[in-house]
Amino acid sequence: MKNKNLDNLIKMMSRIPGLGPRSARRAVLQMLQNPTGMMMPLAEYLTKVAEEVVICDVCGNIDVNSPCHICTDHSRDFSTICVVETVSDLWAVERAKFFKGKYHVLGGTLSAIEGRTPESLNIASLQNRIAAEKISEVIIATNATLDGQTTGYYLVDMLKPHGIKTTRLAHGIPMGGELDYMDEGTLTLALKMRHDF
């Protein structure tokens, strides 16, 4: 069957991380077998989420409010910030239910090859937070990839003049591993065993 809208839907679905063209085609075909039970509710929730969700002005998390529920939770340790690459990394650390501080989402990593500079990431706002808030520790929780490590070292150099304790996640996260794919036990251990960068 040749249909422009169907082709466009499959192309759009194939952009979702973890779905290639074949997986996207299978997902669309599965939904087409029950359009009122699967496609219409999916379309409705996609619209609702697109209209309701905002990016937190403070930390970069996504929520229905800005500041987000984590930034406004007074039971958290406001003196510790865990710096992560993406919102999915923040959610991964939260799933471990061990860290009770605040977060800062960079929005990616530094990469000379791909042209990602400090100005293209959420680094200036981190500097502003460090200057304005009473922060005693910054945990660098970038992924154990080359770009993640490069970004971590850049952040350590940036934070040195502030005299703030800077730590990184302990070993246990394998080199090349990404936080979103780690189990809660590994993340909890990595947070407990963190040490100076």
Image: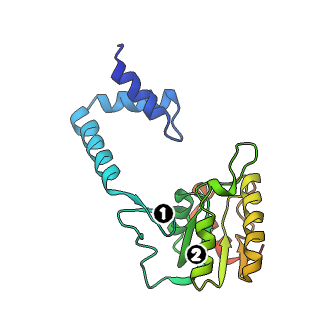
Which mark is on residue 134? none
* Picture layout, residue 93 above or below residue 28: below
* Picture layout, residue 66 above or below residue 147: below
Q: Specify the quadrant of the image occupied by residue 186.
A: bottom right
Number of marks? 2
Neighbour class for label 1 at 10 Å: few (<14), some, many (≥20)?
many
- Residue 1 x %, y %: 35, 13
Which image quarter holds the C terminus? bottom right
* Picture layout, residue 132 above or below residue 26: below
- Sequence-first disc among 2 and 1: 1
Amino acid type of the residue tagged 2 in the rendering: Arg
Name the element at disc 2: helix
- Residue 145 x %, y %: 73, 53
Residue at left 53%, top 57%?
Answer: 88
* Residue 97 visible (yes or no): yes
- Residue 122 x %, y %: 59, 61
* Picture layout, residue 157 above or below residue 132: above
* Residue 185 visible (yes or no): no
Name the element at disc 1: loop
Residue at left 25%, top 43%?
Answer: 41
- Residue 68 x %, y %: 42, 69
User: Image check: 147 left or right of 83?
Assistant: right
Residue at left 45%, top 85%?
Answer: 75
Q: Nearer the viewer, mark 2 or mark 1?
A: 2
Tell me the distance, in whole angstroms, between the alpha carbons under discs 2 and 1: 15 Å
The residue beneath circle 2 is 129
The residue beneath circle 1 is 61
User: Image check: 80 left or right of 33?
Assistant: right
Question: In front here: 189 or 191?
Answer: 191
Residue at left 33%, top 52%?
Answer: 49
Amino acid type of the residue tagged 1 in the rendering: Asn
Q: Residue furthest left?
A: 36
